[in-house]
Amino acid sequence: MTSKEQHIVIVHFTTDKENQNRAIQEVGDYIESFLSCQSGFIASRLHADTDGYGLVHYAEWSSESDFLAAAGKARSHPDLPKLMVYKPRASGYQVLRKFTSA
């Protein structure tokens, strides 16, 4: 698989200092128990904003079609209502270049 075939999805979640830890747990549990088990899922990382006001989930998928199939299943996932509290905003990207340390 070339990097140009991979599909990257970045999701921003809005939190505040009072609910960021709960969001980390809820979003992380969802990724671990559901999303990571979907066909085409490669890997992901969950990042917390250092000021307490957000999370970013960076996910690598084999293809956009694999991601879209998983997103279709996610629409009926029982955890979706509690995740929507964090106002997720997703964008898809194509990998153009990768850089590593020299």
Image (cartoon, rainbow, N blue to C red):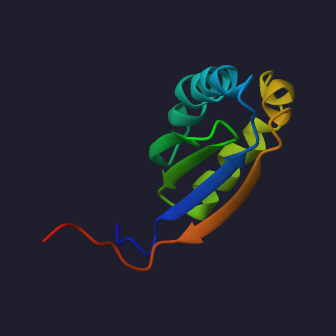
Q: Quadrant of the N terminus?
A: bottom left
Give coordinates of residue 20: x percent, y percent: 68, 28
User: Which residue is at 61% across, 56% downward?
Assistant: 10
Give coordinates of residue 17: x percent, y percent: 71, 29
Say whether residue 64 is left or right of residue 43. right
- 18 vs 38, nearest the viewer: 18
Q: Residue furthest left?
A: 102
User: Which residue is at 65% across, 36% downward?
Assistant: 52
Looking at the image, is 40 positioned above or below residue 5?
above
- 29 vs 72, nearest the viewer: 29
- 75 vs 27, nearest the viewer: 27
Give coordinates of residue 90: x percent, y percent: 72, 55
Q: Residue furthest bottom?
A: 96
User: Which residue is at 23% across, 67% downward?
Assistant: 100
Quadrant for residue 51, please give it: top right
Give coordinates of residue 12: x percent, y percent: 69, 50
Q: Residue furthest front?
A: 51
